[in-house]
């Protein structure tokens, strides 16, 4: 399979970058997770670019250190967490998490972050009791283990995560509660707490995608979410002053997923019906939001 119509309607999507070098991960109708690459022009996204295969309808999360180390997470047909790992010089291989046997709810989403620019990983997914669980990789030879439990959430909630900082590390996780409020959990080195973002959103299992850049007064956080009217909208944080409604508001297909990568060029990926199931890229520039690429490969 290689055509755009082999990309799943309401496909999961995840993205990473190094400078202007981009990677976007999308799912095919058979559960295959495909990589599209931007190296001056877009390529990939075909059956030759499958890096792993999850269950049909699998969620996908991606995180990276530059593009030298990439990790992509998904859910297997056995409803266990899977990991596709990339190392420059050796290519893609099945990551250690795939053999750890961590079971998740059949409706679980997944999110992931590298911490502090090092080989330290955190993965978030939903358990069968509807709580959000963290799994930890510290590159200390002990392998993957269960971390903190972040508490209950809407069954089948989307999960998004972002992290920043080196000497002082920060994590933010976003999900939706049983009352359909989108909420934030924060970690700044001394345990988890309820963050300052909490707003009502009457879309059940709303799409969520998060990214961040900088730190301190130069910190930027962006959360993209599925809103009523088949729109993807934005919540923004710029170092101080609290959260506000960002300017991003784009039409999507019903229940489109969303992913974002940070400045120097902020980019957002969603399905809006272009060429049926292709992902469209929006980019933020001096004149505001514009279409960066109308239809990503394999379109």
Image: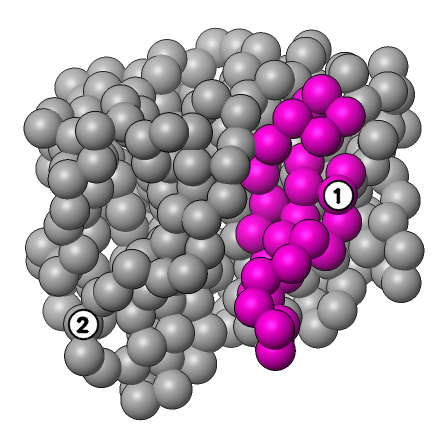
Viewer-proximal residue among 102 and 176: 176
Q: Main secondary structure of the magenta part?
A: strand
Tell me how far mark 2 sits from mark 1, CA to CA.
33 Å
Q: Is 42 drawn above or below residue 151 in the view shown?
A: below
Residue 239 versus residue 52: which sits nearer the camera?
239
| Residue 294 located left or right of residue 189 | right
Residue corresponding to mark 2: 242
111 magenta-colored: no
Q: Position of residue 158 (x, y in %)?
A: 35, 32
Q: Position of residue 56 (x, y in %)?
A: 58, 11
Q: Secondary structure at mark 2?
A: loop
Q: Secondary structure at mark 1?
A: loop
Residue, disc 1: 294
User: Earlier along the polypeptide chain: callout 2 or callout 1?
Assistant: 2
> Mark 1: few, some, or many residues within 10 Å (few <14, many ≥20)?
some
Along the line of sight, which residue is nearer the eye, 219 or 132?
Answer: 219
The range drawn in magenta is 266-295
């Amino acid at each position: 399979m290689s055509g755009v119509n082999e990309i799943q309607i309401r496909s999961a999507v995840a993205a990473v970058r190094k400078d202007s070098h981009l990677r976007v991960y999308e799912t095919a109708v058979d559960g295959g997770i495909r990589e599209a690459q931007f190296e001056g022009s877009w390529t990939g996204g075909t059956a030759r670019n499958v890096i792993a295969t999850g269950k049909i309808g699998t969620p996908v999360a991606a995180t990276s250190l530059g593009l030298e180390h990439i990790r992509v997470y998904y859910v297997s047909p056995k409803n266990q967490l899977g990991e596709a790992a990339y190392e420059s010089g050796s290519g893609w291989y099945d990551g250690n998490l795939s053999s750890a046997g961590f079971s998740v709810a059949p409706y679980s989403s997944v999110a992931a972050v590298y911490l502090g620019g090092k080989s330290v990983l955190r993965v978030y997914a939903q358990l069968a009791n509807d709580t959000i669980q963290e799994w930890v990789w510290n590159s200390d030879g002990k392998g993957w283990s269960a971390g903190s439990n972040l508490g209950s959430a809407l069954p089948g909630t989307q999960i998004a995560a972002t992290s920043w900082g080196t000497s002082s590390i920060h994590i933010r996780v976003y999900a939706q509660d049983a009352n359909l409020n989108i909420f934030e959990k924060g970690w700044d080195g001394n345990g988890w707490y309820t963050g300052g973002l909490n707003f009502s959103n009457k879309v059940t299992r709303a799409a969520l995608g998060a990214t961040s850049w900088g730190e301190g007064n130069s910190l930027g956080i962006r959360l993209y979410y599925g809103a009523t009217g088949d729109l993807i909208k934005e919540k923004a944080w710029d170092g101080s002053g609290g959260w506000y409604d960002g300017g991003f508001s784009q039409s999507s297909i019903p229940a489109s997923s969303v992913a974002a990568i940070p400045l120097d060029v902020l980019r957002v990926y969603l399905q809006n019906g272009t060429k049926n199931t292709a992902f469209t890229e929006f980019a933020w520039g001096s004149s505001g939001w514009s279409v960066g690429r109308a239809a990503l490969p394999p379109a």
